Image (tube, rainbow, N blue to C red):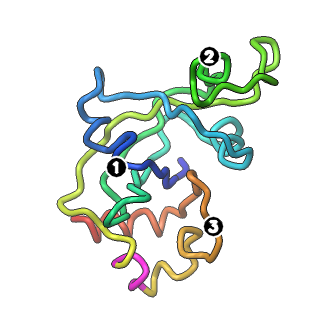
Amino acid sequence: MKYWLMKSEPEVFSFQDLKKRPKKTEPWNGVRNYQARNFMRDEMQVGDLILFYHSSCDIPGVAGIARVSSKPYPDTTQFDKKSEYYDPKATQEAPRWFLVDVSYEKDLEKHISLEELKAQKELAEMRLMQKGNRLSILPVTAKEFEFIVNLGN
């Protein structure tokens, strides 16, 4: 099993939105960064756990736990000319962008702010803490994942 941190702007799609979805599941669409896409396409497996992270908001941080609930498949927004994620170079025969479905796993007792994460010496090497690391999907070690979940509970 692998562990991930996936960022979403809560005004676009929040952890609470995920909980309200039918089957508490949603396709993680709209990723248009090749490295983040490669994580989903090449490395994520059904059952991997996710730290659902709210970004670009007043108090960024970990909002809850989710799980990868599908194998990767083409992101249909790349083919939709009306979508902000439309990619004219993508075709059904050669899709460029992939996604996985994510499902609600559990709430944390408290939101863990980025400020609180940065204050933990145990997380100093975490990719989220590295300067310039702005990817929307990041791998997380099992040790980092467990430490953060314990912070939230």
Q: Earlier in the sequence, mark 1 or mark 2?
A: 1
Query: Residue 41, how many percent across, how many down?
Result: 68, 35
Determine which of the numbered discs, if any, sits on residue 133 in the image: 3
Extreme residue in the left direction: 109
Is 93 magenta? The answer is: no
Say what amino acid the circle numbered 3 marks.
Asn
Q: Residues within 10 Å of mark 1 (few under 14, many from 20)?
A: many
Q: Quadrant of residue 119?
A: bottom left
Q: How many marks?
A: 3
Q: Residues within 10 Å of mark 2 (few under 14, many from 20)?
A: few
Query: Residue 33, how many percent across, how many down?
Result: 69, 45
Q: Quadrant of the C terminus?
A: bottom left
Nearer to me, 112 or 58: 58
Determine which of the numbered discs, if any, sits on residue 65 in the image: 1
Q: Main secondary structure of the magenta part?
A: helix
Determine which of the numbered discs, if any, sits on residue 13 in the image: none
SS at mark 1? Answer: strand
Q: Is residue 97 above or below residue 44?
A: above
Side (left or right) of 56 relative to 41? left
Mark 2, mark 3: which one is toward the viewer?
A: 2
What span is in magenta?
A: 116-120
Q: Residue at x 43, y 80 (%)?
A: 118
Side (left or right) of 48 relative to 77? left
Query: Residue 76, how many percent across, how many down?
Result: 60, 19
Q: Residue at x 36, y 60 (%)?
A: 57
SS at mark 3? Answer: loop
Say what amino acid the circle numbered 2 marks.
Asp
Label 1 to label 2: alpha-carbon separation: 30 Å
Side (left or right) of 12 relative to 151? right
**Which residue carries the number 2 mark?**
80
Q: Is residue 131 above or below residue 72?
A: below
